[in-house]
Image (spheres, coloured by chain):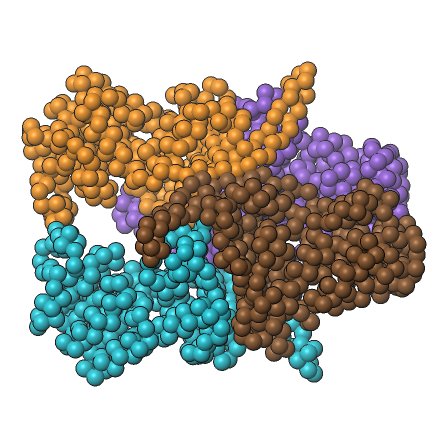
Chain colours: A brown, B cyan, C purple, D orange
Amino acid sequence: MINIAIIGYGYWGPNLVRNFQETKDARVVSCVDMNPERLALVKSKYPAIETTTSYEDVLKDPAVDAVVISTPVATHYDFARRALENGKHVLVEKPVTASVAEAEKLIELAAKHGLTFMVDHTFIYTGAVRKMKEIVEQGELGELYYFDSVRINLGLFQRDVNVLWDLAPHDIAILEHLVDEQPVSVCATGACHIGNGIENVAYLTVYFNNGMIAHFHNNWLAPVKIRSVMVGGSKKMILYDDMEASEKVKVYDRGVDVTTPESVRDARVSYRLGDMWAPKLDTSEALRLVAGEFTECIATGRTPRTDGTSGLNVVKILEASEMSIKKRGKEVKL
Amino acid sequence: MINIAIIGYGYWGPNLVRNFQETKDARVVSCVDMNPERLALVKSKYPAIETTTSYEDVLKDPAVDAVVISTPVATHYDFARRALENGKHVLVEKPVTASVAEAEKLIELAAKHGLTFMVDHTFIYTGAVRKMKEIVEQGELGELYYFDSVRINLGLFQRDVNVLWDLAPHDIAILEHLVDEQPVSVCATGACHIGNGIENVAYLTVYFNNGMIAHFHNNWLAPVKIRSVMVGGSKKMILYDDMEASEKVKVYDRGVDVTTPESVRDARVSYRLGDMWAPKLDTSEALRLVAGEFTECIATGRTPRTDGTSGLNVVKILEASEMSIKKRGKEVKL
Amino acid sequence: MINIAIIGYGYWGPNLVRNFQETKDARVVSCVDMNPERLALVKSKYPAIETTTSYEDVLKDPAVDAVVISTPVATHYDFARRALENGKHVLVEKPVTASVAEAEKLIELAAKHGLTFMVDHTFIYTGAVRKMKEIVEQGELGELYYFDSVRINLGLFQRDVNVLWDLAPHDIAILEHLVDEQPVSVCATGACHIGNGIENVAYLTVYFNNGMIAHFHNNWLAPVKIRSVMVGGSKKMILYDDMEASEKVKVYDRGVDVTTPESVRDARVSYRLGDMWAPKLDTSEALRLVAGEFTECIATGRTPRTDGTSGLNVVKILEASEMSIKKRGKEVKL
Amino acid sequence: MINIAIIGYGYWGPNLVRNFQETKDARVVSCVDMNPERLALVKSKYPAIETTTSYEDVLKDPAVDAVVISTPVATHYDFARRALENGKHVLVEKPVTASVAEAEKLIELAAKHGLTFMVDHTFIYTGAVRKMKEIVEQGELGELYYFDSVRINLGLFQRDVNVLWDLAPHDIAILEHLVDEQPVSVCATGACHIGNGIENVAYLTVYFNNGMIAHFHNNWLAPVKIRSVMVGGSKKMILYDDMEASEKVKVYDRGVDVTTPESVRDARVSYRLGDMWAPKLDTSEALRLVAGEFTECIATGRTPRTDGTSGLNVVKILEASEMSIKKRGKEVKL
C-alpha cells in the first residue's frame, strides 16, 4: 500500500483525492493546504485523512511514501525538492516547474535518491491520446508533417503566467508524447490587451530538424471554445476534437502523392481521398490512470510514461516561447 | 456602355464574363487567351465576343475601354502596365502583383493617366464581409484586439507561390478592409513537405502599433476544409464561418471587463456572457458587385472600394511574410 | 423550515438530496430505500439524515412535512396517496403516475387535504425552457403552428414501459408548459425489435383544435444522441438543441407571409428570412429551482408551476398514445 | 445514338439537357415547352436542338427515340401515355404519376410496346445511396429495424400537392431501393397552416410485416434545412446526412444485444459501442448516371434500376398517405 499526501486542495485537489482513494494499492493519508476551510472540506468527505497546514508534518511523517503537488506553478520546485530530499516520491501538476533549470534539478535529485518523479500530463492518459499514440506508433500516418493545436475560449485570465504557460502545456505534452523527434527551436508571437504585459492571445511555432512543424494557438478571449489537434502525415491525418461528445478522434485516409520526375521543380502532386474512421475510445477517467501509473511506478521502480523528462521537455518549449514572444517572434533555439 | 476585354479565360474567366455580361452599362467585347480551345468555349457561349490570342489586338482596339486581368500572378504587372499605358482601365485578380514595387508602379501609372485601377478582392463584396464592415464601423466590437483567420483544406498545390501567396490574400484583404490602423511588421513560419522549397503550411502574425494582432493559418494539406475568421474586440466578438450554409456571421456579446484598481499588476478581469446574434446577410453574388463597382468607378471617376492601394497593402504583407518565413520567423517591418 | 423525506435513493436520489440540502428553508431529514447499501451511501455523505427501509416510519413521523417520491413509476400512486392521506406535501418524479385515473385521484386528494402536490418536470425549470416560455408569452412567435421534438440515443431499454413513457414526458411537459391550447387527440406508431412487445422506437402526433400539431420522436436504438425541439409560429421559429454546449436556444426571424387574394385556392406564399438570435440563458441547476419551488409553494400555499394538473396532462397524452400505438396509429381522443 | 426529346424546360430542364448531351450514345434533338422564352434559352445555348411548343411534333418525329418528361406531376400520365403509344421510350420525373392507377397503366403500356419506362429517382444514383445499398446488401447492418428520414426546410409551398408528395418521394425511393421487404400499410398525420387544405407539415409511418418501421418527416416551414436518413439494424446503423460537405454517410458499429433467458419478459439488453466509419463516396453527378442508365437500358433492353415499378411503389405509399392524413392517421393498407 502506497501512502499518499496531497499538497494543495484547490480546484484539482478533490479529483486527485477521489482518484487515489479508488486506486488499488494506494490511499490518501494526509492533505496539506494553507486554507483551513479547504481542509475542513476534505475532513467532511474523508474523515480518515489527516489534514494540516504544515508541509513539514508531511515531510517528517515516515508513513507518507509519496506526495502529489497541486499548487501554483511557482511553488512546484520548492515543494518537490523538499519532498525528494526527504525520500518521498513526487507527482506534480503540469507544468512541472516554472523553469528548465528547476526541472533539471528535480530530475537529478530524483535520480540520486532513486525516487519516482512524475508529472501529471493528464491528457496523455485519455482514451483519445492513447489511441492517437497507437495509430502513430503503428506508422499509419506515415512520415509526420505537422501538428496543429487550437485551445481557445473565454477563459480565466491568469495573473502570473501568460496564456501559453496556462493552456499550451496540455498540447505540448501531447506533441512530446506522439513525436519521437526532438524539436530544435521555437518562434512565438502574441499580444496583451489588459495592460499588464501578460499575453492573453499567443501563437507558437515549434521547428523540428526533419521538416516537421508544430503550431499552438491559445486565447483567453475567444467567443467560442475550441479544443482541437490536427496531425498530418504523408499517409493519413488525424483530427482530434475534444469538444465532440463522441467520435473525438477521426482518422482521414487523405493526402497527396508527390512524383518528382527530373527535378524537384517539376514535382507533381496528386490527391488522395479515402475513408474516414473514428475508432472507439476507452472512456476511463484519465486521472484514474495517472494515479494508477504513479502507484505502480513507485511499487515496481518502472519509469512513468510522463516522467520528469517529459515535464522538462514541455517546460523547455514554454521557456523558449516566452523569450521569443518578448522578442516579437525571434527564433529561440532549444 | 463600358467595353470590357477579359485577359485570361481560365478557372475564373467564365465567372468574369458572365458577371460583366449581366452588369448594366458594361459588356464584354473581347477575350484573350493563349489557348485556342479556351477561346472556342467563349465563342460557343457568347458568339458576339471577339476572341484572340494576341493581347496587342486588344491594346490597340479603341473600342476597348477596360481590361480585366485573370492570368498567373507573375504576369499581372506586365499586362496591367501595358493596358494603363494604352489608356485602358484595369481590374486585376488578387494578389494584385508579385511584388510591392510592381504594385506601386501600377498605382503611379494609373494616377498619371487618370485611369481606374482596381483589384478583385472578391470577398470584400460578399454579404458576410459587408455586414462585418458595418458592425465594425458602428463600433459595436469596441476596440479591436485580434483578427484570427484559418483557411485550410486538401488543396491544389501551386507550383510557383507558397500557400500564403495562394490562400492568405483573401483574409489579408478582409483584415485590410475592416481595420483602419496600419500594420507595422510581420512574423511568418512554415514548412515544405514535398521537397521543392515552397511552403505548403504556414502561419503568419501581423503586428499593429495599437496592440492589435492578426494571425493567418494556411495549409494545403489539411484533412478538413476550414474557412473562418474571428475578430475580437473589447465589447463584442465576431465569428465568420464561410463553410456554414446560413448564419455565416455570428456576433457574440461576450468579453471581459478589466478593472485596474491601483496598479496594472492588480488588474482584475470579470467575464461578460450575453446573447449571440446572426444577422441576415445579403446573398448577391460578390463578383457581380465587383463588376458593378468597376463599371461605376470608370463611369464616375470614383475610387473603387478595393483600389490599387488595398491591393498594394495586401502584397506588402505577403512580400514581408515571405522574407520572414525564409528567416524562420524573424520580424520584418512593413 | 420544511422537513423533507426522500423516498427512493436511486439514480436521481443524490441530486434530490443535494439540491434540497442547499435550498433555503428546506432540509432533508430522512431517506427511505429498500436497499440498505443505498442508505449507507446517504449516511456516509449526510450523517444527520435518518435512513430507513420502512415508509411507515416516515408517514408516522410528525417532523416530516413533505415527501419527494423518486421510485419506479408503477409505485408513484401508492406512495403519493399514502403521503397525502397522512398530511404530507408531495413532489413526485415524472411521469406523475402510471395512469390518468391515478393522477386524478391524487389531485383530488391533495385538494381535499389542502396539500401541495407537485411533479418534477425538471426541464420546465431549465434556463432554456424558461427563456422559450418568455418568448412565446410575449407573442414573438405569433400564432403557434407546430411543435416538433426528437429525443433519441442508444439508451437504456426499460423493462416495463415503452420508449414514449420513458423519454417523451420531458418534451410533452415542455409542450404542455408552452402551449395554452388543449390538445384534442393523438396518433402514435412504433415498433418493438427485441421481442417483448415494448416499443423501442415510437412516433407520436398530438392534434390541437386550432390547427397546431405536435410530434414526438423517441428511440432507444439510435446511433447518435439528439435532443431537439422545434417550435414554429407565424412570425418566428425556435430551435432548442439541448446537445449544444452554449446557444441552446436559437430564435429565427423566418417564415412565410400568405396573401389570399380571392379564394384560398390562390393563396400566395412569400418567404421571410431575417436574423437569428441566441439569447443568453440562465445556467442555474434546474433541480435547484424545482426544490425551491416546492419549498416555497408549501410555505405560501401557492400553486406550483408544475402542479398535479400538468402531471395529469402529460399522462393523458401518454395513456392515449399507448392505446393508439397498439391500434396502429388509430386516433385516440383525449 | 439515342435521340432524346426533353418535355418541359423548367427548373430541372437545363440539368437534363446538359447531362444527356454529355452522355455517350445519346443526344438531345428536341425540346418542348409552352413558354417560348424558355425555348429561346435552349436555342441560345444549344443551337442544334429543335425547339417547339407542340408535343405533337415530337410524337410524330420518327427521329425521336425517347422522351424525358419534366412537367408538373398532374400531366405526367398524359405525356407518358402518348409517348409510349407512339413508340417512344420514357423517362419521367418523380413522382412518376399522380396516382397508382396511372402508374399501373403506364407500366402495362410500356410492357405491351416493349419500351423502356424509367423514373428519375435521382437520389438512388448518388454516391451516398449507392454506398448505402452496398452496405445493406452485404448484410453489414444485420436485420433492418427502422428507417427514419427528415427532409425539412423553409421551402417552396406547392399549390397542388402537399409536402409529402413534394419532399417524401426522394426518401421513399431510397427506402424502396434499400429494403427488399414489401411495406404493408401506412399512417400519416399533418397540418395545413395557410388555409388552403394542403398540408405543409406531415409525418408518415410505413409498416412492414417483418417488424421493420419507416418514418418520414417533411416540413416546408422549418427554420433550418435538414436532409437526413437513419437506418438502424441489429448489427450496425447508418446516418446519412446530405447537408454534410463530406462524410455524408457514417456507419456506426453500435447497437444492442438481446439475451432472452427463459421468457421474453426477462429479455436482457446489453449495449455495443464500436468504431464509426465514413466510407469514401463516389462524387459523380447523379443525373449523369440517370441519363446513362436510361440510354443503356434503351440500347440493351435491360430493366432500369429505377423502373416503372419502383415509381409505382413510391406512388402507392404517397396515395395511401394522403388517404390516411385526411382521416387523421387511420391505418391504410397498401
The spot of residue C59 in percent (x, y) is 85, 38
What residue is rendered at 49% in x and 70% in y?
B329
Q: Position of residue B69 (x, y in %)?
A: 22, 66
Q: Is residue C170 above or below residue B154?
A: above
Direction from residue D253 to residue A113 in the image, left or right: right
- Indicate left or right for D82 with C304 as reference: left
Q: Is residue B183 above or below residue D281?
A: below
Query: D257 or D319: nearer the eye?
Result: D257
C179 and B147: which one is in front? B147
Near-viewer residue (C122 or C133): C122
- Estimate the x, y position of residue B115 in percent, counting from the top left: 20, 78
In the drawing, does residue C308 fall left or right of residue B254? right
Residue D71, given in percent of the width and then of the height, sits at: 21, 37
Q: Quadrant of residue D220?
A: top left
| Quarter of the rendering containing residue A321 | bottom right
The quarter in which the N terminus of chain B is drawn is bottom left
User: How many numbered callouts?
Assistant: 0
**Is B326 on the left or on the right of B126, as rendered?**
right
